Image (spheres, grey):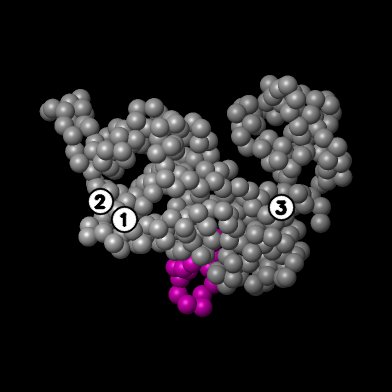
Amino acid sequence: MVLDMEKNIAGIDINQIRITSLSHIQGQPQVINNLELNFRAYFNIRSTLEDSHLAFGPVILCGPSGTGKTMVAKAIHAELGNGKLIETNGVTVNNKLELFSILIHADADTTIFIDEAQGMNSKTQHILLTALSENNLYVPASVSATYSRTIPLACFTLILATTHEYRLQDALRNRMRVYCRFDYYSVKDLVEIVRQRADALKWQYEEQVPQAVAQRAKGIPRLVLNINLQTCWYVAKSRGHNVITLADAYEAFAHLQIDDAGLDKLDRSYLGILLECGKSSLGVLSSKLSLPSLTIQRVVEPYLLKEGFIVKENCVRKITKKGRNHIENHSVVSK
């Protein structure tokens, strides 16, 4: 982990930290162990070859948003020692010219990282599959403006990250040799992540702060760092403090409107509707919350289902005893 600042100068932003090794990553042991095994095999095999141009992977990183897939992708790039990292996303590469440009200009020293890969359409996935399996790119006359041709491709490293792996075609998904599945983080791991990042930034904090910050992050590093910890630091600085106190943290949680389970105003509104109605369909919830159904399904419900605050029965949502107790006792941000 490298802080892009002069020595002994404290950081001001969570994202000033660059991940340069898998050893810097806390949590996701199944992912790290899988990658380390593949790295050992890769480097051992490459050392026996006269031509060292051997591609690593391809790699697919699957799991909920905010669980560190992009961070791990950059750590893979750093571990390989590749000189060029091309970052893009599934929707962008649906533009053929964009995809062709990326593939043609990639060499054996290039890592191509496609985030939100489920956004790729079927044609784009087919082109990518052909590029991986044949190391060739077929350019039709309609694109080349002259005549169709086949362009040989280098052995680049490809990393796909997705929150919905089964939206990828079976052929492409099964072509991934290194398969890494991410899960939500434990509070214990999140506490260490908070300590690690705050220490790297030279932020001082009271002993109880990392635990308080971590238990309100829904098991997601992005929330624990970019939202919770960063806001705690802003509150401390607004009060003229050089140390993040527990009181600063509680003021930050009140500002963010999150309770001790990490539920925010939207989560509690969702549970409040179910508490009032007993049960409800997705359409009714969408109408009452003034949110698209897809947003509710992808953003609000996964954590509530995982933690047992709600259950789904025949397309109807019901609040559980745990959800009922929580909404009745934690309607305001608690300490």
Labels 2 and 1 touching (C-beta < 8 A)? yes
Q: Position of residue 150 (x, y in %)?
A: 18, 34
Numbered tag placed on residue 216 in the rendering: 3
Q: What amino acid type should be assigned to the residue bearing mark 2?
A: Asp
Residue identified by numbered label 2: 107
**Residue 227 visible, this orientation:** no
Q: What amino acid type should be assigned to the residue bearing mark 3?
A: Arg
Q: Which residues are magenta?
A: 1-14
Q: Residue at x 67, y 62 (%)?
A: 191
Label 3 to label 1, Cα distance in Å? 37 Å
Secondary structure beneath dot 3 equals loop
Q: Is the residue marked by circle 1 packed among few (<14), some (14-19), or many (20+) residues within 10 Å?
A: some
Q: What amino acid type should be assigned to the residue bearing mark 1?
A: Lys
* In the rendered image, the vertical position of residue 236 relative to residue 218, given as above or below: below
Q: Is residue 317 left or right of residue 240?
A: right
Q: Residue at x 42, y 61 (%)?
A: 40
**Residue 196 visible, this orientation:** yes
Residue 127 or residue 212, whichever sits in front: 127
Residue identified by numbered label 1: 84
Q: Position of residue 204 (x, y in %)?
A: 64, 72
Q: Is residue 212 left or right of residue 42?
A: right
Q: Is residue 216 magenta?
A: no
